[in-house]
Image (cartoon, grey):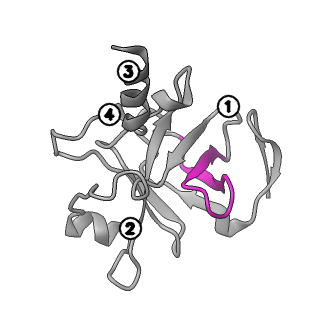
Amino acid sequence: MKIESTRFGTLEVAPEQIIHFPHGIPGFLDEKAFVHLPHDENSPFSFLQSTAEADLSFLLVDPFPFIPEYEFVLGDEMAGELELSEENPPQVFLIGTVREKITDMTVNLLAPIVVNRNKGIGRQIILDKTEYSIRHKLFPEAQASEAAEGGE
């Protein structure tokens, strides 16, 4: 299948790369199918590109290399909807936002993307945990280092 992307040009996509979001993604409820595009094999970064809208793509971040303590409870209903189990655990991604400098990059901890890669289905869920932020600094040590160097 071929899809058009403003960011990546024309892409030839295998069916197993497509993730179906039956409920869409908040803010983009009509967008139901996305292709998952890894940045490279060992990178914690990837992209989620709409199969229908060339201008719609999200930067995804695997949270665990950066925030190993990140956790949330996925309710039985949601796990059942996504057909997840101990034998088929979810993949979890965070939507990232790159600012002017890469060291200012933030991720949304309150609304992870949960994916069942075996079934090709996913959902963005909104968590109740108020200690999580929608603009969590991915590289807080870089900011601390910059502040120390600048004497701030």
Query: Relative to 46, does residue 77 appear above or below in the rendering?
Result: below
Q: Tell me the distance, in whole angstroms, between the alpha carbons under discs 3 and 1.
A: 36 Å
Q: Tell me the distance, in whole angstroms, between the alpha carbons under discs 4 and 2.
A: 23 Å
The one of 46 and 138 positioned closer to us in this rendering: 138
Q: Earlier in the sequence, mark 1 or mark 2?
A: 1
Mark 1 secondary-structure assignment: loop
Position of the N terminus by quadrant: bottom right
**In the rendered structure, does residue 88 fall within the stretch colored magenta?**
no
As drawn, is 47 to the left or to the right of 78?
A: right
In the rendering, which numbered label is found on residue 147?
3
Image position, residue 34 (x, y; %): 60, 51
**Do residues under tags 4 and 1 come within 8 Å of each other at their CB atoms?**
no
The one of 70 and 74 positioned closer to us in this rendering: 70
Mark 2 secondary-structure assignment: loop
Task: Identify residue for label 4.
Answer: 134
In the rendering, which numbered label is found on residue 97?
none
Q: What is the magenta range?
A: 31-50
The one of 58 and 69 positioned closer to us in this rendering: 69
Q: Earlier in the sequence, mark 3 or mark 1?
A: 1
The one of 71 and 79 positioned closer to us in this rendering: 71
Residue beneath the point at 55% across and 31% down: 102
In the rendering, which numbered label is found on residue 55?
1
Q: Tell me the distance, in whole angstroms, between the alpha carbons under discs 4 and 1.
A: 22 Å
Q: Earlier in the sequence, mark 4 or mark 3?
A: 4
